[in-house]
């Protein structure tokens, strides 16, 4: 595999792999350190999305990578922090690249442009003595793909938004730079306050009334913010506050 050193990251590039996240996990199983290791692929034969989902991406068109983080400084109960900092890093880089302000983080792990999905994040953590150990952070970002198959719900790519082609490696480096900044912030209480605030500022649909499916029923709700353990805090029209996890709530469009 081709290797490049960038700042404190070791970047590896491959043409094809089953899944970059899976590859990272097999490195952990083999007892290797994945800290600051990045694997970027042109194509995944078995790209994973959240739950049972498959992550589709046309060969060579989009950014597909996994990043290893030594997350020992984060308590297991605070693992949502990793979702927050990678999402902020992606949104920061997107705003720099396009001077667009319309990129949003759709809770918990999607990157949205207006009402469409530009990317997603898939994280798996190992835990030791109540602290996180190694974290595998997978990112899929639609960059240069012009068309998407019909079965993908509301996809969009950067090329569709700004009508130009982007250099994938440059975007990767930009995201990693922003990520390092947010990792530093995550190491202090003051920095965590800034992360929570920025995440909230960038959260899709915050403060707006929309329809959601909650425990199988449709309701009009408003996002108030993020609660303990990264739960989504919502308000009902009757003024009641509810805490939702990923399995209980579905965004409707
Ligand atoms: C989601 O939106 O459901 C998460 C998608 C995450 C996709 C990325 S692509 C690189 C990395 N390797 C994988 O198999 N999945 C993640």
Image (cartoon, rainbow, N blue to C red):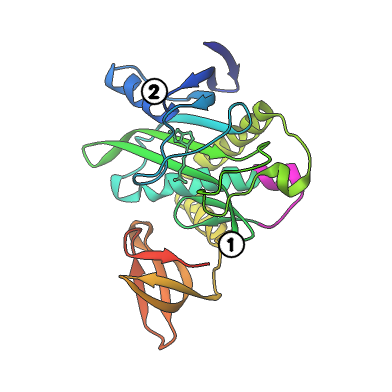
* Identity of the residue drawn at 55% across and 61% down: 203
Q: Is residue 94 magenta?
A: yes
- Distance from the alpha carbon under mark 2 to that under mark 1: 34 Å
Residue density around tag 2, few if under 14, some if 14–19, many if 20 or more, within 10 Å: some
Q: Residues within 10 Å of mark 1 (few under 14, many from 20)?
A: few
Dot 1 falls on a residue whose secondary structure is helix
Picture layout, residue 147 above or below residue 245: above
* 189 or 244, nearer to the observer: 244
In the picture, the disc for residue 23 is 2
Q: Position of residue 74 (x, y in %)?
A: 36, 42
Q: Is 232 in front, or is 178?
A: 232
Within the image, what quadrant is residue 9 found in? top right
- Can residue 182 be found in the magenta stretch? no
165 sits to left or right of 127: right
Residue 39 in the figure: left or right of residue 80: right
Q: Is residue 29 visible?
A: yes
Of residues 118 and 196, the one drawn nearer to the viewer in this rendering: 118
Q: Is residue 8 above or below residue 216?
A: above
Residue furthest bottom in the image = 238
Q: Residue at x 47, y 58 (%)?
A: 107
Q: Which residue is mark 1?
A: 201
Any mark on residue 226, and which?
none
Where does the image place residue 134, in percent across and percent down from the top left? 35, 31
Residue 49 percent location from the top left of the image: 42, 42
Q: Which contiguous range is marked in magenta?
A: 93-102
Q: Going 56% across and 11% down the picture, which residue do you hit? A: 2
Asked if the residue at label 1 sits under 8 Å from ligand 1, the reply is: no
């Amino acid at each position: 595999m081709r290797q490049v050193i960038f700042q404190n990251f070791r970047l590896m590039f491959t043409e094809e792999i089953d899944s970059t996240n899976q590859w990272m996990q097999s490195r952990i199983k083999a007892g290797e350190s994945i800290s600051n290791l990045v694997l970027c692929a042109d194509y995944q034969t078995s790209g994973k999305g959240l739950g049972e989902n498959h992550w589709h991406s046309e060969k060579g068109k989009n950014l597909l990578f996994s990043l290893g983080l030594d997350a020992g400084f984060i308590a297991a109960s605070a693992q949502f922090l990793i979702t927050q900092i990678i999402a902020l890093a992606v949104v920061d880089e997107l705003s720099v690249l396009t001077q667009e302000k319309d990129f949003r983080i759709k809770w918990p792990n999607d990157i949205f442009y207006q009402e469409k999905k530009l990317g997603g994040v898939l994280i798996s953590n190992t835990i030791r003595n109540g602290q996180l150990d190694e974290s595998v952070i997978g990112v899929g970002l639609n960059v240069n793909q012009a068309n998407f198959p019909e079965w993908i719900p509301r996809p969009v790519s950067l090329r569709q938004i700004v009508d130009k082609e982007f250099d994938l490696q440059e975007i990767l480096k930009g995201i990693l730079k922003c990520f390092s900044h947010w990792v530093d912030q995550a190491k202090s209480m003051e920095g965590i306050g800034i992360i929570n605030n920025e995440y909230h500022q960038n959260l899709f649909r915050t403060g707006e009334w929309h329809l959601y499916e909650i425990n199988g029923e449709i309701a009009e709700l408003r996002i108030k913010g993020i609660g303990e353990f990264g739960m989504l805090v919502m308000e009902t029209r009757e003024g009641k506050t509810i805490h939702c996890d990923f399995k209980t709530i579905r965004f409707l469009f």
